[in-house]
Image: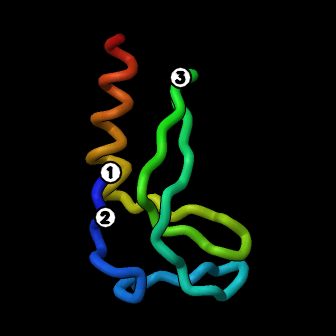
Amino acid sequence: MKNQHGAPEDLPWRCDRCRCDLVLGQVAAAYMGNRFTADLPYCPQCKAVLITEKVATGKMAEVEQILEDK
């Protein structure tokens, strides 16, 4: 997935648990036994990942459909 924010300092989100600014980086995901990485905002302290509605209903939904069609 492509970076949708430009630079990490452009991220408007903070972790509610840790109060840290989210950073953009590669995170691992798995679906139906397939593993892949994506550039997503995450908390550098607790590693919680933010998946926006736009990403969930866009690119991630496309990937899910491709994997389910296999």
Mark 1: secondary structure: loop
Pinpoint residue 55: horizontal percent, then vertical percent.
33, 54
Residue shown at 61%/73% (left/top)? 43
Disc 2 to disc 1: CB gap under 8 Å: no
Q: Amino acid at mark 3?
A: Met
The residue closer to the viewer here, 29 or 65, is 29
State the residue at coordinates (28%, 76%).
Answer: 6
Instruction: Give yes or no for contact between labels 2 and 3 (Cβ–Cβ under 8 Å).
Output: no
Q: Are marks 1 and 3 in contact (CB under 8 Å)?
A: no
In this rendering, would 53 be left or right of 58? right
- The label on residue 40 is none
Question: Which residue carries the number 1 mark?
Answer: 1
Q: Residue at x 31, y 64 (%)?
A: 3
Residue at 35% x, 86% y is: 10
Instruction: Name the disc covering residue 3, or none.
Output: 2
Label 3 CA crowd tier, 10 Å (few <14, some 14–19, many 20+): few
Name the quadrant of the C terminus.
Answer: top left
Q: Position of residue 34 (x, y in %)?
A: 52, 26
User: As displayed, is residue 36 above or below residue 5?
Assistant: above
> Which one is in front in this view, the residue at disc 1 or the one at disc 3?
1
Residue type, label 1? Met
In the rendered image, the vertical position of residue 59 relative to residue 70, given as above or below: below
34 relative to 20 in the view: left or right: left
Q: What amino acid is found at the position of numbered circle 2 in the picture?
A: Asn
Q: Nearer the viewer, residue 19 or 24?
A: 24
Q: Which one is earlier in the sequence, the residue at label 2 or at label 3?
A: 2
Q: Percent x, y for residue 19?
A: 66, 88
- Alpha-carbon span between mark 1 and mark 3: 18 Å
In this view, 15 is above or below 19: above
Give SS at disc 2: loop
User: Which badge, 1 or 3, is on the more N-terminal residue?
Assistant: 1
In 3D space, how far apart are the residues under numbered discs 2 and 3 (Cα atoms)?
Answer: 24 Å
